[in-house]
Image: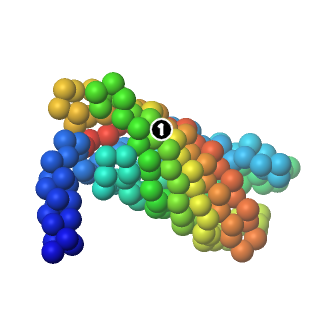
Amino acid sequence: MRLAIAFLVLAFAVQAQSFSKNLITFSGGWADQIGPSYGGERATSIGLTYGYRALRHIAFEAGIQTALQPGPEVRGANYDFQPDDRYIWVPFGVRFILPLDDDRFELSAGGGGLYQRYSISNSGSGFGFNAYNAWGGYGVGAVSVALDRGRHFWLGASPRFFLANGSYARDRWFTITGEFSFRF
């Protein structure tokens, strides 16, 4: 009987939540490969994330983010090779949210697992660029502000750190993106 009463109280509390449970975020910005062995490869980064806010301060999220043509141009006396490459990251994890100012401003931080795919369209070039897959983790922080009174449209900024270890690659990427979110 106690379990049934606890379940009913929990069910009523869940229905009484005033925040939007679903979140779709479009992001765009800049990505930079970091670490002592990298030559500062930079790229445009775009992404899409879905989040499910299970509790007021906890959301589960999964998404896809990419860095477009980060590889450096390779030049010599008789050749000029520009790799047609991209990194695709699929982060999945949890985010902890701190709502402020009557739920119109939020700070958040989180992290989780990461699947990474490096692909290159012209890999048969002989310059050592090869496609590979890797697993790893990520960390994220964000600041967001509501644009409307109903708190459906949000604008924010988010730095992310991706860490992936493939068969021979040790990739470390830092991205910073502007974000536009829709909550329902």
- Residue 164 placed where, x, y %? 65, 62
- Residue 78 placed where, x, y %? 82, 53
Q: Is residue 33 left or right of residue 57?
A: right
The structure residue drawn at horizontal position 74% and vertical position 43%, both measured from the top left corner, is: 40
Q: Is residue 21 left or right of residue 77?
A: left
Decide which of 136, 78 is in the foreground and name it: 136
- Residue 15 placed where, x, y %? 14, 53
Q: Look at label 1 and name its amino acid.
A: Ala
Residue 153's place in the image compared with 132, above or below, is above
Query: Number of marks in the image?
Result: 1
Decide which of 156, 78 is in the foreground and name it: 156
Q: Is residue 95 left or right of residue 132?
A: left
The structure residue drawn at horizontal position 14% and vertical position 56%, both measured from the top left corner, is: 12
Please, which colouring scheme is shown?
A: rainbow
Say what secondary structure mark 1 lies in.
strand
Q: Residue furthest front?
A: 2
Residue 121's place in the image compared with 99, above or below, is below
Whether residue 121 appears in this view of the structure is no
Decide which of 109, 57 is in the foreground and name it: 57
The structure residue drawn at horizontal position 47% and vertical position 38%, both measured from the top left corner, is: 142
- Residue 72 placed where, x, y %? 71, 49
Q: Which residue is mark 1?
A: 142
The structure residue drawn at horizontal position 52% and vertical position 41%, both measured from the top left corner, is: 141
